[in-house]
Every structure is written in structure tokens, then in C-alpha cells.
Amino acid sequence: DIQMTQSPSFVSASVGDRVTITCRASQGISSWLAWYQQQPGKAPKLLIYGASSLQSGVPSRFSGSGSGTDFTLTISSLQPEDFATYYCQQANSFPLTFGGGTTVEIK
Amino acid sequence: EVQLVESGGGLVQPGGSLRLSCAASGFTFSRYEFNWVRQAPGKGLEWVSYIDGVGSTTYYADSVKGRFTISRDNAKNSLSVQMNSLRAEDTAVYYCARIYSGVTYVFDSWGQGIPVTVSS
């Protein structure tokens, strides 16, 4: 199974800050990586697929990069609605696996 | 508008069974692959099971293999999972999640989730 490791687990940040979350796969997954945002009590929402493709309707302040084993989600200027938990997911092979999540909290 | 609505959750005793359903609308159901993903209280996301568009190919997480069975009825635009021999560690919110058409194994639409509690 491919293990996905996210860091950090928690980020404390202010509105307007630039936030970077990393995700590492235990083996190469090319660009088969997605990022999701989950608000408390809500279903996850797809942000990024193919490591760097922005899902329709997602603000351009979100961006993704990386390939192989190392990936990054960047929020260029944090907005109040961005305080949430973010998950990476490898889409390379079954079993599909998620990272442990990164919670972005208000500083 | 894409809508996925889960039902069938609730409280069940260890060793018991439960069948979850997901009613789909707003798109051509048979053209999409589906999954069940769960989230234990206070924990992260865990993929549970996958089914292709015609129901001929299925995959399961090791944690549920042999106990859960995923199925679909394209005539009724419905996805299901039969959960048997339930354990306390199966307690979670269960989501049905659609695979993004043309994008391998990425979930573009999710239901609102349905809680399942396994406890005596």
C-alpha cells in the first residue's frame, strides 16, 4: 500500500498569510495526486487533481505542485473561509489512500 | 445539479449488519464509477470500496474485505454497501463519492455523509 504523509498536522495562520502544506508518498505516484478541503461537519471538497490542476470553481489562490513522491498545496493569501482541514490523496493505485490531514487554524 | 444522498445509517450492535444506500441525481449515473469513503470520529478519511460503472469490478480496503459488499443499480441510480459482521472500529461517517470522469480515482462529488455507530 502507498502511505501518504502530510506535514504539518496543524498550521496556525492569519488572514492574508501564505500557507504551504506538503504531502509525501511512500513510493512514486507520478502526478496522481489530489487535494481536498473539509470544513467541520461537511463533506470533503475537491480542490486540486493531477497534482496541479485546479478544479472548476476553486479560487486561484489555491495551487498545487510536485510529482513523484513530493507534493505541495499552497494557499497564496489565506481567506477566512479557508480555515479548514486539508487532505492529500493518491490516485495511483488501490487501495486509495489519504494523508493524515492538515488543519489550518486561525492565529 | 449533482446530488448524492446517503441513507440507512444508524446504531447497530457489534456483529450486526447494516445496508447503506446512496441515491444519485443530476447526472447520468451509469457513466460514473463510485466509492465509499469513511471518517471515524475525529479522524481522517479512509477509502473503503470502489465499483466501476457496470458493477463488474470492485475493490475493498483490507479492513472491510470479506465483510462489506458494494453494489449498484443503474436502473435506480443507486449505490449500496452491505456491511456485515460490524465492529466498533467501523463506527464512522460514511460518504458515497463519485469518481471524476476522465480523471483516475479522484473524487469530484460527495454525499453529505451518513453516520454509522457500532456499539452495544
Image (tube, coloured by chain):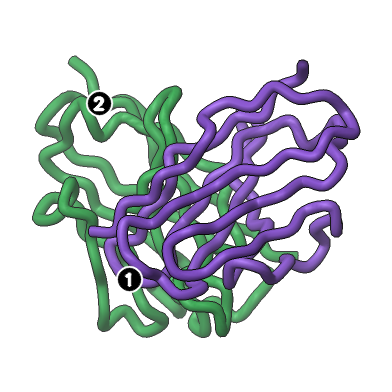
Chain colours: A purple, B green
Q: Give the number of the mark in front: 1 or 2.
A: 1
* Same subunit: marks 1 and 2: no
Q: Are there few (<14), some (14-19), or many (20+) residues within 10 Å of tag 1?
A: few
Identify which residue is drawn at 46% across, 79% down: B75
Chain under label 2?
B
Res B94 seen here: no
Residue found 31% across the figure and 63% down from its top: A27
Is A36 in front, or is B76? Answer: A36
**Closer-to-camera residue (A63/B67):** A63
Residue B92, compared with residue B61, is above or below; it is above
Picture quadrant of residue A80? top right
Residue B12 point in image, percent of width and height: 24, 27
Q: Nearer the viewer, residue A90 or A11?
A: A11
Q: Which mark is residue B118?
A: 2
**Residue sitting at 87 percent across and 41 percent down?**
A77
Quadrant of the image containing the C terminus of chain A: top right
Q: Quadrant of the N terminus of chain A?
A: bottom left
Residue found at the very far right of the displayed protein: A16
Amino acid type assigned to the residue bearing label 2 in the image:
Val
Horizontal and vertical percent for residue B52? 37, 78
Residue drawn at x 40%, y 44% is A5
Task: Please name the amino acid that badge 1 sits on.
Answer: Ser
Crowding at mark 2 (Cα within 10 Å: few <14, some 14-19, many 20+): many
Q: In which quarter of the view is residue B57 placed?
A: bottom left
Q: Which mark is residue A93?
A: 1
Q: Is residue A11 above or below residue B54?
A: above
